[in-house]
Amino acid sequence: DAPEEDDRIVGRFASACAAVTTVPLKYARTNQKKAVWGLHDISVRPKLPKDLMTLTFPFELLAEMWINIEESFLTTDRWNKVARRISQN
C-alpha cells in the first residue's frame, strides 16, 4: 500500500525480545508504520522450530491492512496455493 517506501518491513539486528516488543513499540510510539521481521537472534534460534519467524505490526498499521485485506495478495489463487502448501507441513 506504500510503494514509495522500501522499508515498510524492517529486519533489525536485535534480540528476540526486542524484535517482538521493543522495536515495534518504538515505531508505534513515533507513528512510523513499520512491521518488524524477527527471531533471527542467534542465541534463541537453536531453541525454535526452523521454520518459525515473527512479523510484528504496530496496531495502527495492522488495522489499516485489515481494511484493505479484500484487495490484498491474500485473496489470490497464488496465495491459496502457498497456504495449502504451508498447511501440509
Image (cartoon, helix red, strand yellow):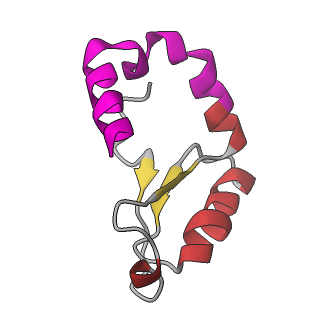
- Please, what is the dominant secondary structure of the magenta stretch? helix
Q: How many marks?
A: 0
Question: Above or below — where is 11 with respect to 84?
Answer: below
Residue 14's spot in the image, x, y percent? 49, 78
As drawn, the residue found furthest toward the front would be 88
Residue 67 falls within the magenta-colored stretch: yes
In percent of the image, x 53 and y 80: which residue is there?
Answer: 15
As drawn, the residue found furthest toward the bottom would be 43
In percent of the image, x 63 and y 56: which residue is there?
Answer: 27
Residue 52's spot in the image, x, y percent? 42, 60
Question: Above or below — where is 61 with respect to 51?
Answer: above
Q: Decide which of 60, 46 is in the foreground and name it.
A: 46
Residue 5 falls within the magenta-colored stretch: no
Which stretch appears magenta? Answer: 63-89
Q: Decide which of 43, 50 is in the foreground and name it.
A: 50
Question: Above or below — where is 79 with respect to 76?
Answer: below
In percent of the image, x 34 and y 67: which residue is there?
Answer: 50
In percent of the image, x 63 and y 17: which residue is there?
Answer: 67
Residue 80: quadrant of the picture: top left
Residue 48's spot in the image, x, y percent? 45, 73
Question: Above or below — where is 45 with respect to 56?
Answer: below
Q: Classify residue 69 as left or right of residue 82.
A: right
Residue 2: quadrant of the picture: top left
Residue 72: quadrant of the picture: top left
Query: Quadrant where the N terminus lies?
Result: top left
Residue 12's spot in the image, x, y percent? 43, 69
